[in-house]
Structure formats: C-alpha cells, structure tokens
Image (cartoon, rainbow, N blue to C red):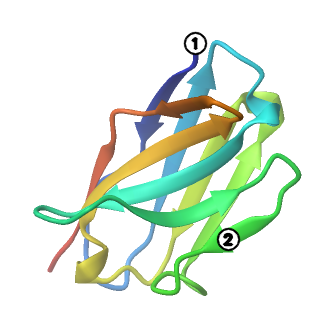
C-alpha cells in the first residue's frame, strides 16, 4: 500500500507561481510512474503532467512551457512547478502513482488563481 500526501496549494494571483509536492510512503517510489491531475468544479479529472520511472515527461497542451514535473526518488517525492498561472488553472490537483495494476491517489490540494 502506498500513501500519497500533496502539499503546496493555495491562492495565487494570475502570473504567479506555486510548487506542489507529493510525498509517498509505503513502497519503492522509484518504480512508479507519477502523474499530476486536476479537477475543476463540474468538470472531469484531467492529466496535467506525467513522468515515468526513467524520467520521461509528458504535458497537457494547456500547461506546456509553464509547468514542470520532476521527481526526487531519494526523497520519495514528486513535484509540479507551476509558473505563469492563469485563472483557468484553478482546480484541485491530485498526485497519482502507477505501476502495473497498482494505482494510487492522493487526497488533492486546492489551487486557486485569482486577483
């Protein structure tokens, strides 16, 4: 069993930055692919960014050039650096770890972009 705890969300003005963290415990973090997803009110949960165990990354078109996903396997922690934030980035952000049939989610952290 893997436990995930996200942190780093909050209220930020348009154009600002936030860094989300996803701390994992209970298993070997390095073997998992890690993703960040987000869900706005009334909308489906969508992939924001993903990083494989080997470090390959993928981004949603809406965040390319603004967000950066990374991981520190020694600290069992993943990150999402979010720059040039826009009001449409407002959502609950969730961390996800996947390895084979194993699929784990965090509880989510709220990001609100507003002036």
Quadrant of the image occupied by residue 38? bottom left
* Residue 107 higher or lower than 54, as above or below: above
- Report the side of 31 relative to 104 (left or right): right
In the rendering, which numbered label is found on residue 58?
A: 2
Residue 33, image x, y percentages: 71, 45
Q: Residue at x 23, y 81 (%)?
A: 87
Residue 3, image x, y percentages: 51, 20
Could you tell me which quadrant the N terminus lies in?
top right
* Outermost residue to the right: 54
| Residue sitting nearer the eye, 113 or 45 | 45
* Residue 100 higher or lower than 90, as above or below: above
Quadrant of the image occupied by residue 25? top right
- Local packing at callout 2 (Cα closer than 10 Å; few below 14, some 14-19, many 20+) is some
Which structural element holds mark 2? Answer: strand
* Residue 58 higher or lower than 41, as above or below: below
* Outermost residue to the front: 101
- Local packing at callout 1 (Cα closer than 10 Å; few below 14, some 14-19, many 20+) is few
Badge 1 is on which residue? 1
């Amino acid at each position: 069993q893997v436990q995930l705890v996200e942190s780093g969300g909050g209220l930020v003005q348009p154009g600002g930055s936030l860094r989300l963290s996803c701390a994992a415990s209970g298993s070997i973090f390095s073997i998992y692919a890690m993703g960040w997803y987000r869900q706005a009110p009334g909308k489906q949960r969508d992939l924001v960014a993903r990083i494989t165990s080997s470090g390959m990354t993928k981004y949603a078109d809406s965040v390319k050039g603004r967000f950066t996903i990374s991981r520190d396997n020694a600290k069992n922690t993943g990150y999402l650096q979010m720059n040039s934030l826009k009001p449409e980035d407002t959502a609950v952000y969730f961390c996800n770890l996947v390895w084979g049939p194993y699929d784990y989610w965090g509880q989510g952290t709220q990001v609100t972009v507003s002036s």
